[in-house]
Image (cartoon, rainbow, N blue to C red):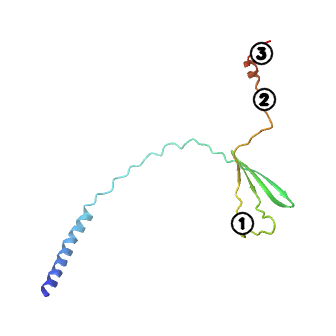
Amino acid sequence: MKRSSTLCLTLVAAFAIAGIPLQAGAQQAAPKPPVLEKLDEGQAPEVTIRPSAPEIQEKREQGKIKEVHVHSGGSNYVVKANEQPGSIQPGEGQSTAIRVPQWQILDFDLGMRKEKPEGDKAATPPTAK
């Protein structure tokens, strides 16, 4: 029994001594990081960003805002007030406290016909008499 514990202790000491030079050698053998070169900055891009203030139209009834129409750049959307019908309170039943904006995607003009340009009148073939 004494022999096995002595053998075990000897092996642990040998591995500990052998491991120290390996770790020190591994730290010294690490390559140095590459030298970084300075780059010329060059010219700034020629981009002009024009801030545009959105057009806001509010619809009020009895001093309360009912709808807000916002025209910002190329997008248009409407935000409506979140009014619950009857006596439903926000958070009860099927009511919700969130009212998302309604984005206008396309605008159809069904009542108006487009007038033909004058150049199209000359391009139509003459009618037979």
Q: Is residue 43 left or right of residue 90?
A: left
- Residue at the spot of label 3: 127
- What mark, if any, has residue 94 been given in the picture? 1
Asked whether, in this view, residue 117 is left or right of residue 49, the answer is right
Q: Amino acid at mark 2?
A: Glu
Q: Position of residue 109 (x, y in %)?
A: 77, 39
Neighbourhood count class around disc 1 (C-alpha, 10 Å): few under 14, some 14–19, many 20 upward: few
Q: Residue furthest bottom?
A: 2
The amino acid sitting under disc 3 is: Thr
Residue 118 at x, y = what percent? 77, 23
Q: Work out how far the residue at label 2 is from the one at label 1, CA to CA, in angstroms.
A: 49 Å
> Which residue lies at the image location 78% right of the left edge and 33% below the top edge?
113
Q: Answer with mark 2 or mark 3, whichever residue precedes in sequence.
A: 2
Q: Earlier in the sequence, mark 3 or mark 1?
A: 1
- Mark whose residue sits in front, 2 or 3: 3
Image point (19%, 74%), residue name: 15
Q: Quadrant of the N terminus?
A: bottom left
Asked where in the image residue 26 lies, by quadrant, the reply is bottom left
At x 22% / y 67%, what residue is drawn? 22
Q: Is residue 87 above or below residue 126?
A: below
Specify the farthest residue to the top: 129
* Residue linked to disc 2: 115
Q: Earlier in the sequence, mark 2 or mark 1?
A: 1
**Residue 17 percent across, percent down from the top left:** 19, 74
Q: Please, is residue 87 above or below residue 129 in the view?
A: below
Question: 80 or 93, which lies in front?
Answer: 93
Position of residue 16 relative to residue 6, above or below, is: above
Q: Nearer the viewer, mark 2 or mark 1?
A: 1
- Position of residue 66 in the picture relative to residue 43 (left or right): right
Callout 3: few (<14), some (14-19), or many (20+) C-alpha neighbours within 10 Å?
few
